[in-house]
Image (cartoon, rainbow, N blue to C red):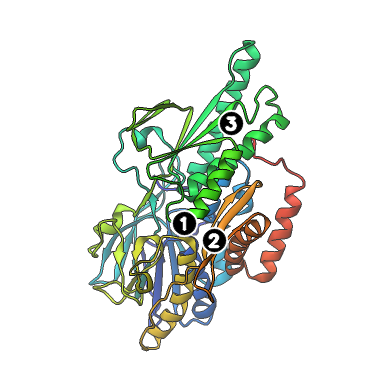
Amino acid sequence: MTAPTTLQPIVPSTSKKTDGVPRIVVVGGGAGGLELVTRLGQQLGKSGRAEIVLVDRSPSHLWKPLLHEVAAGSMDANTHQVDYVAQARWHHFEFQQGELRGLDRAAKQLSVAALIDDEGIEVLPARTLAYDTLVLAIGSMTNYFGVEGAATHAMALDALGQAEHFRRRLISACMRAQNTSAATPGAASRVDVVIVGGGATGVELAAELRNTAEVFGAYGLHHLDGQRDIHLTLVEAGPRILAPLPERVALQTGKLLEQLNVTVLTGEAVVKVEAHAVLTASGKSLPADLIVWSAGIKVAPILGELGLPVNRLGQVPVLASLQTEIDPAIFAMGDCASCPWPEKNTTVPPRAQAAHQQAGFLVNALRLQLDGKPLPAFRFLDHGSLVSLGRFNAVGNLMGKLTGKSLLIEGLLARLLYAALYRSHRMVLLGPMRMLLDLLAQWLRGKTVPRIKLH
């Protein structure tokens, strides 16, 4: 079932292009896709030079790296969401809500599924959208790697609804533990949270949950000790956490997690997930009230059903121009694209900074395409990586342009740079003035609401 809609105007079952005006359709309103349509709308849609259309199954956007904060309750998503309909109105593009279902390259049309609300009622009919240029930016989703019980008993953090579901489960588990302790003197008030996957999402969630656990006592859960009673375990199959990052960043992060009383188990492959336990290949059985799966990503299966070549990970291979190998009218970007990185003899990693850079590249490339000019080659610049440990710390590495080496950073500087990444994304979407007003509004709101969301 697709997400319910808000403020979405009724559209005809088939959306026709304006005669003589080229149409650029972007599928996927994640960080890269929304930045792309926002800038294209300002530069091409506003002047009538092109029609810009965004297709997404959700009604709003939230920067994906924030989902762990929503899950931990330390962020209210309502203050950070961007409504696609409003964004479209302000930035001169059209929004079509629905899920991609098929592609007809010969007719240059894509099909969008009907939109069904929570009551099972059709809100919008199935549609076909004509395009002159198509950009696939549908991102990625959790990969359970076929582990028995993982998809059934573990929760993913791919979307806002999943993050909020975990937060509600966490609060319920803590309240049950508190009541058990209060009703039965001497009874253990214990909550076990197991996070599978030692990548950035898993590490950041573990730190953020420790922050939440320490705050609970101030809001009524007085019998629950945030350090003693809420047990956090991070399980990683590889030899260390944060495998894509430099080893010294991983080592420093591991020390910080140890200080936060987070148990880190490396070299432990999960072989089965049960309702209240995680089983590993070494024979460990980890008790769990809540299980989060963040062990890897994959591309949505629909990409393999569009008639485009895909690699073993399900990504669409693209040329240096980000055009697909068999159709110059179709581009792919972000996590769903396998983009060459010649300098490293590999492909561009699935990171937010890559999607941001590709969005900026495509704004220029699509304008050149409209003019019939040759397209440049995309060049990824690795600026390093940052991992947020909530209010406790942040750690990461910056790539030095002069030395070609990375610089380890942590503490206040790392936290400021991490915050700046999000603010740069908001600036693209809102503009400088509205971004500053948005920052002020969030600061004021932080003075009048609890530190964590309690419902």
Identify which residue is drawn at 47% across, 72% down.
381
Label 3 sits on a secondary structure element that is helix
Bin the neighbour count of mark 3 within 10 Å (Cα to Cα): few under 14, some 14-19, many 20 and up.
Answer: some
Q: Count numbered badges in the picture.
A: 3
Under mark 1, the amino acid is Leu
**Looking at the image, which is closer to me, 206 or 179?**
206
State which tag comes first along the sequence, 3 or 2. Answer: 3
Q: Is residue 136 left or right of residue 413?
A: left
Disc number placed over residue 171 in the picture, else none: 3
Under mark 3, the amino acid is Ile
Query: Disc 2 marks which residue?
Result: 397
Cβ–Cβ below 8 Å for labels 3 and 1? no
**Looking at the image, which is closer to me, 343 or 287?**
343
Query: Disc 1 marks which residue?
Result: 245
Q: Is residue 303 left or right of residue 235?
A: left
Is residue 455 shown to the viewer in this render? no
